[in-house]
């Protein structure tokens, strides 16, 4: 199998490439820049071909597909700056990347009779209540512009591709890029106290764990909608921050506040991001490990704690 991966300069795309390489699967990485612009860790950068591609340009997509001739696409590229997406001047770019770009890829996948795995998000739902969101739910009611474009992207995939996987994730952290854990560590080293919301509930997702699952999926024919976050129950961002500092051995005080009290976000965040993951097991996939274990392994990966430290 030959796999094309978009967004390899980002957190998830980088780890997906490394997982494919580790399994000796032929893989091509793509992103917008002429040369790879992500972290230079000597893995995905040096051991797999990189092909520049602008997913918003249909001709660019077609040219890359004609060159690579992939059997499968793992689509990790997206505009993910949720607050910036609310700015009117950015909205055309957000739509171009998340909707038009996905549609261009979906059409190319269909023409090639290939598989497509598309990464989506908890933001496609309205984020209300406490009931778990089922994987097959398509009752889209996004609160933010980012969420609206990701919902439209899901529709673009289902309308154009027969052999598709749509995988919704949440609260992502990985080596190659910005994330909540890195922010908490940085702020915690310069502040005695941090304020973190305690009324938004979900589960973190470690890109290394997710990448293993995504490659398992693309090698299968178990198509459809899935939810994939780490196991270990549903928590608030406040509880997430407390665990990060506990494992990192930091004494920073975490003060719980409501979303309204926090009040710094342009985009409306979902209060309820409880994604039901049971379809993974029902389809024969191995769930992701517990999120606390994932945090430990990630802190080791970024050099924040030694490998032999207690969890």
Image (spheres, rainbow, N blue to C red):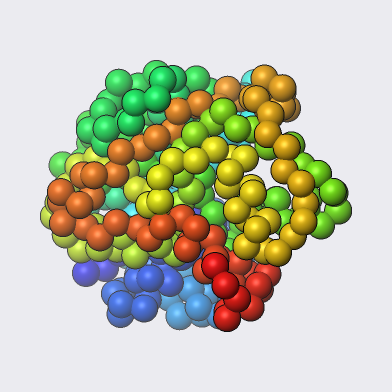
- The image shows residue 259, relative to residue 232, as above or below, that is above
Q: Quadrant of residue 124?
A: top left
- The image shows residue 293, relative to residue 202, as above or below, that is below
Q: Residue at x 38, y 60 (%)?
A: 289
Residue 74 visible from this viewpoint:
yes
Residue 100 visible from this viewpoint:
no
Q: Residue 212 or 304: which is nearer the viewer?
A: 304
Q: Residue at x 37, y 76 (%)?
A: 21
Quadrant in the picture for the C terminus: bottom right
Q: Residue 100 or 74: which is nearer the viewer?
A: 74
Quadrant in the picture for the N terminus: bottom left
Residue 269 locus on image (x, y percent): 55, 27
Residue 260 locus on image (x, y percent): 67, 20
Q: Residue at x 81, y 44 (%)?
A: 193
Q: Residue 274 or 78: which is nearer the viewer?
A: 274
Residue 27 locus on image (x, y percent): 35, 70
- The image shows residue 170, relative to residue 272, as above or below, that is below
Residue 235 locus on image (x, y percent): 49, 40
Total marks shown come to 0
Q: Residue at x 64, y 25 (%)?
A: 259
Side of 10 relative to 169 (left or right): right
């Amino acid at each position: 199998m030959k796999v094309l991966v978009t967004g390899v300069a980002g957190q998830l795309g980088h780890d997906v490439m490394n997982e494919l390489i580790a399994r000796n699967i032929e893989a091509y990485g793509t992103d917008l820049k002429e040369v790879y612009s992500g972290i230079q860790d000597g893995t995905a950068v040096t051991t797999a071909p990189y092909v520049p591609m602008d997913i918003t340009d249909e001709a660019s997509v077609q040219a890359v597909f004609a060159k690579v001739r992939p059997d499968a696409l793992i689509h990790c590229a997206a505009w993910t700056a949720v607050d910036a997406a609310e700015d009117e001047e950015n909205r055309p770019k957000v739509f171009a990347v998340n909707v038009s770009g996905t549609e261009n890829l979906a059409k190319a996948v269909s023409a090639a009779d290939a598989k497509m795995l598309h990464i989506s998000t908890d933001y496609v739902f309205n984020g209300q209540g406490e009931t778990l969101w089922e994987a097959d739910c398509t009752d889209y009611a996004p609160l933010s512009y980012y969420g609206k474009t990701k919902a439209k992207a899901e529709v673009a995939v289902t309308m154009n591709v027969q052999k598709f996987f749509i995988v919704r994730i949440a609260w992502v952290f990985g080596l190659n890029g910005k994330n909540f854990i890195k922010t908490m560590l940085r702020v915690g080293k310069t502040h005695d106290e941090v304020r973190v919301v305690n009324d938004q509930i979900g589960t973190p997702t470690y890109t290394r764990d997710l990448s293993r699952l995504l490659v398992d999926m693309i090698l299968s024919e178990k198509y459809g909608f899935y939810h994939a976050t780490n196991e270990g129950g549903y928590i608030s961002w406040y509880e997430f921050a407390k665990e990060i500092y506990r494992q990192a051995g930091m004494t920073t005080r975490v003060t719980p506040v409501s979303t309204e009290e926090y009040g710094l976000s342009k985009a409306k965040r979902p209060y309820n991001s409880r994604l039901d993951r049971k379809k993974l097991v029902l389809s024969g996939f191995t769930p992701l490990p517990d999120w606390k274990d994932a945090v430990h392994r990630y802190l080791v990966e970024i050099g924040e704690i030694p490998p032999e430290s207690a969890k």
